């Protein structure tokens, strides 16, 4: 679709199995700075407490042991601790938890220990070694508010307290029920299915001329995946709604059959 009103998928969208694009809004720069400040303060407190305990324990030891204790403390506080926390909490540090943020992959999936480690490793340099200046300017210039650690790990920070609202699924037009039940319908490409869903959800807000024009264009593209054609005189929006509704019902039926088959093949003991 070339019309920007019905763009297929944007860079910030995560497309589900039903061709629904979920927009995960990136965290604002202010929210990231606030969460980062909380994390830095907590890290400094942990560093001071750990250094005091180890300093007391190794105060009468030789210099080599004290040097090892210092290096071990830095590694544990700046690398091991943040990596472990973000891995176990699904991308949430204490600062992010307080601000309602979390870290996700660029494809909107949950991060792994590798992502968390890379973010912590680069974060030590850009946040602590250079007082946060590289992180601030990188996030300010990035459309997703990414710091250098996010670029290296392939992640970004999103707002996790945004309520997700999905459009209601298309309903089957009464006059096309019999035709849809016997028609041969292949799975639509993700972009086309998404464009049809957007059209059906917005058709009430479009002027009749623009609505009919977009409907005809979409119907022509969908027709290559459906046979036979609908009854003569079927409006484009009814045709598109029937196809989307029928595909959804068939996919749900297939999933139920697959679940029943798995249940039979893997009986409970």
Image (cartoon, rainbow, N blue to C red):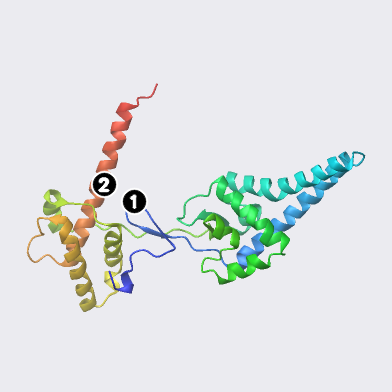
Image vertical order of residue 226 relative to residue 11, above or below = above
From the viewer's perspective, is 233 left or right of 55? Answer: left
Q: Position of residue 107 (x, y in %)?
A: 45, 55
For mark 2, give the secondary structure. helix
Q: Residues within 10 Å of mark 2 (few under 14, many from 20)?
A: some
Image vertical order of residue 162 relative to residue 7, above or below = above
Q: Residue furthest left?
A: 232
Q: Position of residue 36 (x, y in %)?
A: 66, 60
Mark 1 in CB contact with mark 2 (< 8 angstroms) = yes
The front one of 258 and 71 is 71
- Is residue 31 visible in the rendered image? The answer is yes
**Residue 6 occupies quadrant:** bottom left
Give the spatial CA distance, label 1 vs label 2.
10 Å
Quadrant for the N terminus in the image: bottom left
From the viewer's perspective, is 12 left or right of 61? Answer: left
- Is residue 90 visible in the rendered image? The answer is no
Q: Residue furthest top?
A: 269
Q: Residues within 10 Å of mark 1 (few under 14, many from 20)?
A: few
The front one of 211 and 118 is 118
Q: Which residue is mark 1?
A: 17
Q: Residue at x 14, y 49 (%)?
A: 181
The front one of 93 and 62 is 62
Q: Position of residue 18 (x, y in %)?
A: 32, 53
For mark 1, give the secondary structure. loop
Image vertical order of residue 24 relative to residue 247, above or below = below
Q: Residue at x 20, y 56 (%)?
A: 243
Compare marks 1 and 2 and give the one earlier in the sequence: 1
Badge number at residue 251 = 2
Q: Residue at x 27, y 65 (%)?
A: 200
Q: Residue at x 61, y 56 (%)?
A: 96
Badge number at residue 190 = none
From the viewer's perspective, is 180 left or right of 38? Answer: left
């Amino acid at each position: 679709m070339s019309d920007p009103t019905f763009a297929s998928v944007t860079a910030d969208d995560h497309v589900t199995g039903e061709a629904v694009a979920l927009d995960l809004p990136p965290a604002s720069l202010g929210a990231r700075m606030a969460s980062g400040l909380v994390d830095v303060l907590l890290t400094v407190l942990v560093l001071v407490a750990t250094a005091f305990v180890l300093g007391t324990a190794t105060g009468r030891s030789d210099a080599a042991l004290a040097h090892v204790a210092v290096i071990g403390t830095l590694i544990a506080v700046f690398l091991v601790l943040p990596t472990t926390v973000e891995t176990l909490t699904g991308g949430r540090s204490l600062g992010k938890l307080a601000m309602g943020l979390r870290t996700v992959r660029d494809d909107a999936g949950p991060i792994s220990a590798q992502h968390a480690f890379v973010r912590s490793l680069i974060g030590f340099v850009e946040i602590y070694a250079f007082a946060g200046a590289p992180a601030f300017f990188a996030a300010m210039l990035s459309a997703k508010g990414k710091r250098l650690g996010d670029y290296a790990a392939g992640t970004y920070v999103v707002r996790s307290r945004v309520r997700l609202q999905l459009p209601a699924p298309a309903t089957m037009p009464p006059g096309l029920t019999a035709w849809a039940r016997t028609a041969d319908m292949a799975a639509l490409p993700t972009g086309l299915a998404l464009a049809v869903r957007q059209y059906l959800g917005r058709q009430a807000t479009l002027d009749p001329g623009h609505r009919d024009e977009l409907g005809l264009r979409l119907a022509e593209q969908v027709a290559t995946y459906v046979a036979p054609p609908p009854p003569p005189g079927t409006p484009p929006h009814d045709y598109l709604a029937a196809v989307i509704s029928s595909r959804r019902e068939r996919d749900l039926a297939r999933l139920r059959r697959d679940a029943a088959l798995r249940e039979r093949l893997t009986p409970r003991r």
